[in-house]
Image: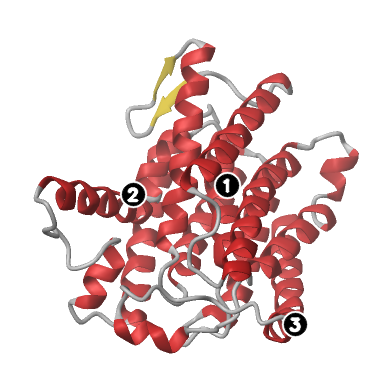
Amino acid sequence: MTFILSFIVAFGVAAIVGQVLIPLLRRLKAGQTILADGPAWHMAKQGTPTMGGIMFIVAIGAAAVVAGWEEIQDGNYKHLYVFLFALVFGVIGMIDDFQKLRHHANEGLTASQKFLLQLAAAIAFTVLMREEGYLTPNLFVPFLNVVIPLPWVMYMVFAAFVMVGTVNAVNLTDGIDGLATGVTIPVALFYMAVSGWFGRTDLAILSAAMAGGLAAFLIYNFHPAKVFMGDTGSLFLGGMVCGLAFALDIPLVIPIIGLVYVAEVLSDIIQVAYFKRTHGKRFFRMAPLHHHLEMGGWSETKLFCVFSGITLALCCLGFLGVMYRYPM
């Protein structure tokens, strides 16, 4: 089956690229700068190579072409559109990472620069998918099995909000060793299962490639991490998570399967709002949520296992919620 081939190709390519990329990043002195106001023990990570997301981006792209070659020959490019959409976010992340390395700081592009670039990518993807006939302005509500039709303008505003929000939520989740990787692997498997169930072979291939590439990356990214994915990897993954949801026409499933992402971004919003309202008091020990729990004594390994396990359970629940999206 092609999705198995896709997983194997992506895993193999990512594992091989990692053997070359990590030493190269070390030679280029592409080391992560750790925030001084973060957990004190994180300072030991200072200098760990970043931009490691390149390895699974290359692997996913290779698998999407190799395993999806028959789909491409048949004129089906949906999986390539989703990959290219995510790749745009990966490029935005790479620019951000380069800026951080150049200035030896933990801040690269400004928030407004990143927002405008991400917004442009979201709008362009939505327009492209609409023009190609891959997208409808009908919102499927999981579990209720009802469809809510929206005017295209309203749908595009909704899509842009969800895409930009999802991408940044995944980015926030990438705060400790292996966390974003471990949480996103079950999400990739969910999309693979749903795509197969819906008969969307092309998207099953892409989802399997995502799972395979991340599984190989975890070899290098699990605690203690030998490499970080950087914004290059986390923004790319955010693009994949929301791109696949929209390509399958089930965007409202994101808050279910991505509850960990949602909790991470909400904890950050609550912390900032509470800090401003109380003139300096903190609602959490530290935001986002994984740092709050870490400051409470949770190890990075425990956080990885609990958050990944919760996501796996939610993905099983999400499958039940969308399995009747299309008549069988």
Residue 72's place in the image compared with 206, above or below, is: above
Q: Nearest the camera: 224 or 311?
A: 224
Q: Mark 2 or mark 3: which is in front?
A: 3
Question: Which quadrant holds residue 287?
Answer: bottom left
Label 2 residue SS: helix
- Kindly tell me whether residue 149 is visible in this rendering: yes
Residue beneath the point at 11% across and 52% down: 279
Residue type at the position of mark 3: Leu
Q: Mark 1 points at which residue?
A: 239
Residue 24 circle label: 3
Residue 262 circle label: 2
Residue 124 coordinates in the image, percent (x, y)? 66, 29
Q: Nearest the camera: 254 or 92?
A: 92
Residue type at the position of mark 2: Val
Residue beneath the point at 65% across and 56% down: 95
Q: How crowded is mark 3: few (under 14 residues within 10 Å), some or many (20 or more)?
A: few
Residue type at the position of mark 1: Gly
The residue furthest front is 103
Identify the mark nearer the N-term, 2 or 1: 1
Instruction: Tell me whether circle 2 and circle 3 mark residues in contact (CB < 8 Å).
Output: no
Residue beneath the point at 72% across and 69% down: 8
Instruction: Tell me whether circle 1 and circle 3 mark residues in contact (CB < 8 Å).
Output: no
Number of residue marks: 3
Label 3 residue SS: helix
Quote the CA–CA distance across marks 2 and 3: 34 Å
Label 1 residue SS: helix
